Image (tube, rainbow, N blue to C red):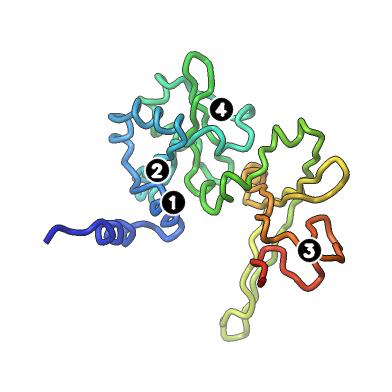
Amino acid sequence: MEETKPARTAAVLAHVPPRYKELVERWGPAVGVEEARSRWGKLVAAAEGGTITLITMDTTQSLGYPTWAAIAPLDKVADPGRCPVWPLTSARPKLADVIADATHFPDGQPQILTRHRSPVVAVVAALTLVDLPPDGERIEVDAFLRQGGTITLAFDAGQDGATDEEGDLLQEPIPARYLATAKEPDGREVGQGEGGSVAEALLRLWRPPAHLYSTEPPFPDGWGNRPDTDLWSPDPR
């Protein structure tokens, strides 16, 4: 009997690091660096059309784990104008270097790829694509600011975890994070985002879906939420 697609998908996911399973389920298995080079033109064209291709690079000997990146559309980069630039023809033979620059912890940056000096796609660390809001709910930072909105950035240092005398975990550590808050010109808060860097926080800046809004008074905050509701939980109605 021919193997079914769900079975093949399950077999692929069994070998995928947990942090990347969401991406593989959506965009398909990662390709290696050499395969990405051999299919370079098609993968770039796919990214221009909105399709992400995951790339895995074997860095197990040097880092202890493989490195995952992605060829992605420009709208998956929060501030492409401030990122390093590679011509497409130069990036292909040096793809390993491009990936290393995009994923290097903690100061990796998206690498913008250009054709005739015009930005077309980007190589990004795959982790920056995890947990992104739906495209219809993302706040496009540049357009929002041009329309008179404001975005405030803040840093939360997080909190160390705690254990008892026997070493049992009492409190999970809370990682440090950057927070982005978007407000309309009238001061009404309309979006929030967070991430491990400023770029990630801006990339995750989103408007809550309509079901998170309330049409009943009182409206204690700028999002129209009653005091007894959780902003990020579905409306029980």
Label 3 or label 2, whichever lies nearer to me, is 3
Horizontal relation, residue 32 to residue 104: left or right: left
- Cα distance, mark 4 to mark 3? 41 Å
Image coords of residue 222 (percent x, y):
82, 55
Residue ID for mark 2: 54
> Which residue is drawn at the image coordinates 62% and 83% (left, top)?
164
Along the polypeptide, which appears first: circle 4 or circle 3?
Answer: 4
Q: x and y percent of residue 53 in the render?
A: 39, 40
* Residue placed most toward the observer, 135 or 98: 135
Q: CA distance from mark 2 to mark 1?
A: 8 Å
**Disc assigned to residue 84:** 4
Amino acid found under the numbered disc labelled 3: Asn
Which numbered tag is attached to residue 225?
3
Residue type at tag 2? Leu
The CA distance from mark 2 to mark 4 is: 20 Å
Give the spatial CA distance, label 3 vs label 1. 32 Å
Amino acid type at circle 4 is Pro
